[in-house]
Amino acid sequence: MTHRSGLILSAFVMGAGHHAASWRHPAAPDTPAELTPAHYLELARIAERGKFQSFFLADTLSFSPNLELNGISNLEPLITLAAIAGQTEHIGLVATVSTAFYPPYHLARLINTLDHVSAGRFGWNVVTSTADREARNFGLETLLEHDDRYRDAADFVDGTLHLLNSWAPDAVLRDRATGRYLDPALVADAPARFGRFDFGGALDLPRSPQGTPVLVQAGRSPAGITFAGKYAEVVFTVQRSFTEAHSFRAQLRAAAEQAGRAPGDIRVLPGLWPFLGSTEAEARQLHAELEELVLPEQVAKQIEIFTGLDLSGHGWDEVIPELPESGFQGQQGRYHKLRELIAGGENTLRKLQKEFGTSRGHQVLVGTPEQVADSIVEWFDGGAVDGFSIQPPILPHGLELFVDHVVPELQRRGVFHRDYTAATFRDELRATSAVPAG
Ligand SMILES: Cc1cc2nc3c(=O)[nH]c(=O)nc-3n(C[C@H](O)[C@H](O)[C@H](O)COP(=O)(O)O)c2cc1C
C-alpha cells in the first residue's frame, strides 16, 4: 500500500446539524443542546478525536430569515472558540469574521489573544458579508457593491495583518539588568493607512504564536478567486461534481501563482454532507426521513437568501420565475448555480429541494462508511480537492459516525494522517500538504 496521507478534514458544525430539519429528527438530542456551549465543546472534542485539522464556526450578523424554522446556527464564534481552546490541544479553530463592520484594531486584539489562548491554533474565515439586513444592524442602508466589498476587504485584511505583525518575534527584552522591557526598534509604532482604515500606531499586545491567523476564504466569483489567490491558505467551497471541483481548484492554484505564491499554499476544501448508515439502505432511510421533514417554506427561505426572490406562500410545485443574469449583490456563486438550475427546468421548490435545497448546493453522499471513503479518495487522488469540509446533517450524531467509521477507513487507505505532528494550525497544514502523493 502506498502512504500518501495529505488529506485535510475540517469539521463545519452548525447548531443541531446542517440539515434544515435536523433538530426535529429523533437522532438529534431531545434537549436544545445547540443553545449551550457544552454542545460546541463536545463537537470540537469529537473532531479532535478524529484528528481533523480544523473546526469551523460560521457567522452572520443579522437575524436570519430561516431561523424561525431551521433553528440556531451557533453561539458567537470567537467567544465559543476561546472556551473550546482551553479544552482541546491540537485542532485548528476557525471562526468567520466579516470585514464589513469591525474596526480592525479591535479585531486584531481579539485574533491576537485567541491565538495566544489556543497556543497558535486560530484561523480567520474572511467574509465580506452578503446581506443588506446585516448592514442595517450597523447604521448602514446597504452593503458596498459586490466587487467593492472585496477591495475594501483587502484593505481590512492588510491593515489587520499589519497590526498583528507590528511586534517582531524578539521585541520583548525583559532585561532586568538594564531595565529595558521592550526594544522599540522592533515594534512598528508608526501611523499607517490602508484604504479607509487609519492606525495611530502599533498593537498593544505581544506577537502571538502564529503571528497571523491562518487565512480562510470562501469566494467563488472572479473577485473572490483573485482575493483567495492573494490571501487564502484554506478555501471552503460548494462543488457538486468532480469536474467542476477539479477546475475550481486549478483556478485557485493559478490565482495563487499569479499572486506570487506556490500553488500548494492554497488548500481547497469543498463541503461534503455525509448521510451514513451501516448499510446503504440504512443511510438512505436517514436521508429520506430528514428530507420528508422539510417544509416548503424552508426551501423557499433558502432560495430567497441566495437569490433575493420573494417566494413566500409558494407551494411545492408552483413555477419559480427565471433569474436575471446580473444585478444581484449577494453571494455570486450560489446565485448563478440557482439561475442555471431554474433556467434548466429545476423550477419548483420540490425540484430545487432535490438539486440544491437542503444542502445549499453542497455535495451529498448517502451510503456506508466505505462508500463515502471511496468517493473522498477518488476526488483526492484525482486532484479535485485537498480535503473536505465535513458538514454533518445531524449533530453530534453525524460527526460521531464520520469520526468512528469513515476516518479509520481513510487512515487504512493511507490518505489521512493518524495523528497531529505540529504545534500550530499553520504548521499542521504545512506538514499535511507536504506529504507527497504516493
Ligand atoms: C462553506 C462556506 C462557508 C461560509 N461561511 C460564511 C459565513 O460564516 N459568513 C458569511 O457571511 N459568509 C459565509 N460564506 C459565504 C462566502 O464568504 C462568500 O460570500 C460566498 O462564498 C460568495 O462568494 P462570491 O460572491 O465571491 O461568489 C460561506 C461560504 C461557504 C461556501
Image (cartoon, rainbow, N blue to C red):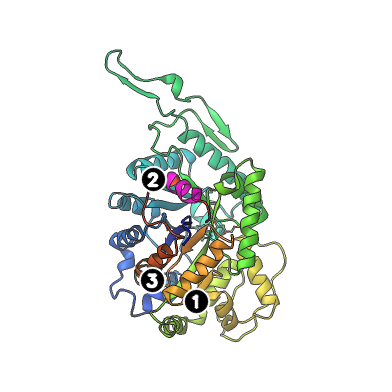
Please name the residue that numbered disc 3 is placed on: 398
Q: What x and y, as percent, mark residue 152?
A: 60, 44
Marks 2/3 in contact by CB < 8 Å: the verdict is no
Mark with earlier residue (1, 2) = 1
Please name the residue that numbered disc 1 is placed on: 298
- For label 3, being within 8 Å of ligand 1 is answered no
| Above or below 262: residue 38 | below
The residue range painted magenta reads: 427-435
Find the residue positioned furthest to the front: 1
Q: What x and y, as percent, mark residue 211?
A: 43, 37
The nearer-to-camera label among 3 and 1 is: 3
User: Is residue 400 left or right of 356 when viewed as pictured?
Assistant: left
Quarter holding ligand 1:
bottom right
| Magenta: main secondary structure | helix
> For numbered disc 2, what is the local secondary structure?
loop
Q: What residue type is labelled 2?
A: Ala
Q: What residue type is labelled 1?
A: Gln
Q: What residue type is labelled 3?
A: Gly
